[in-house]
Image: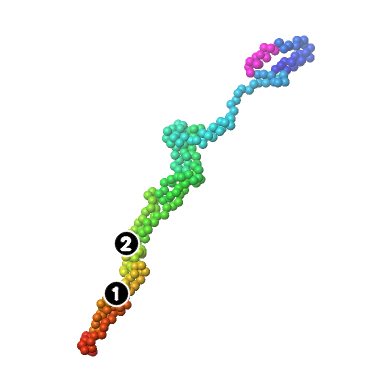
Amino acid sequence: MRTILWWMVAALAVSGCKVELPTRGDFASEYDALVDSGAGLDGAGGEAADVQADVPVESDAGDAADAAATDSLDAADSVDAAGSCSATACDDGNPCTQDGCDPNTHACASLVKDDGSPCDDGNACTQGETCKSGKCLGNAIACNDGNPCTADGCTPGSGCTSAPQAGACDDGDPCSLGDTCQAGSCQAGAPMVCKASEACITWKCDPVQGKCKASYAASGAPCDDGNPCSGSDACKDGDCAGLAVDASKTCDDGNACL
C-alpha cells in the first residue's frame, strides 16, 4: 500500500502540481489499522503480507487412531435404522470373521481371522475345522458301522446314517454257505456238507479252516465192522476191526444165497 502512495505522489509532481511528500507519521494510523487487522510487513521491509487464518491439518497420529479404531470393532454393537451403533450384534454368518460395528463409520464391518483359527462350520459331517483365507474348512468324517447289510451315509444336520440293504454278506462262519442280508443283518446260509461218517471216523466242517475234516474215534471204542464172523469189533486209527470167531460156531451173514 505504501508503494502505491509513493507512485501517486511522483505522478503528481511530474504533472507540475505541488505535492508535499508524506511523512512516516502520516501512515501511522494506517499501519496500526493493518496490524490490528492481522496483516504485517514482510521481512525485507517491503509489501505488507496478509496473515493466513489457521487451517486444520490432518496429522499422521489421527490417521493411526482411525486405523486402530477400524481394527478394533465393537462386537457388542451393530447398526440401527438411523445409521448408528446399536445394541444388536453384527453377524455376517461367517465363523472365520470377527464382526462388529466400526466406531468411525457406524457401519457393520468384518475382520478376517488368522488362518488356523478353530471354527465350526455347522456341518455334522466334517471334523477338525479351521479357518483358511476367511473360510471354515474341515475334513469329512468316515461313516461306517461295520455292518455289510446297511448302506452308510451322512446328513449335515445330524451326522452319520445307515439304512438296511439287500445282497450277499459274510456272517463270519466259514462253515455256512450263501449268507444273505435280511432286514439289516447277515443271516447264515446252508451248512457245508461233508462226506458221510464211518464207523470210526466222523466228518465235519472245521470252523477255523472252513473245510471238512475227519475226526477219529478213540482207539478201542466199540464199533461194528459189518462182518458177522468177527467179534469184539473196536476202532483203531480210524478203522473198525474185530476178532475172528471160533470156526466151530455157526455164523450167519444174513445172505440166503450164500
Taking depth in this image into account, of 208 and 184 the one nearest to the observer is 208
Report the quarter where the C terminus lies. Answer: bottom left
In three-dimensional space, the C-alpha distance between marks 2 and 1, rounded to whole angstroms, equals: 42 Å
126 horizontally vs 238: left or right = right
Residue picked out by circle 2: 182
Colouring convention used in this rendered image of the protein: rainbow
Q: Nearer the viewer, residue 71 or 231?
A: 231
Circle 2 SS class? strand
Asked whether 30 falls inside the magenta stretch, the response is yes
Q: Residue at x 23, y 84 (%)?
A: 228
Q: Residues within 10 Å of mark 1 (few under 14, many from 20)?
A: some
Give residue 249's position: percent from left, percent from top. 21, 87
Instruction: Indicate the secondary structure of the residue bearing disc 1.
Output: loop
Point out which mark residue 11 bears: none
Left or right relative to 195: residue 121: right
Kindly report the secondary structure that dominates the magenta region of the rendered protein: helix
What kind of residue is marked 2? Gln
At x 28%, y 81%, the residue is: 241
Residue drawn where x is 25% and y is 84% of the image:
230
List x then y, in percent, for residue 119.
45, 45
Q: Quadrant of the N terminus?
A: top right
**Circle 1 is placed at which residue position?**
218
Q: Residue at x 56, y 31 (%)?
A: 62
Marks 2 and 1: CB-CB under 8 Å? no
Q: Position of residue 60 (x, y in %)?
A: 58, 32
In this rendering, the answer to whether 50 lies above or below 25 is below
Q: Is residue 255 in view?
A: no
Tell me if residue 130 comes above or below residue 198 in the rendering: above
Q: Taking the image as drawn, is residue 77 in sight?
A: yes
Where 189 sits versus 145, above or below? below
Residue bounds of the magenta highlight? 26-38
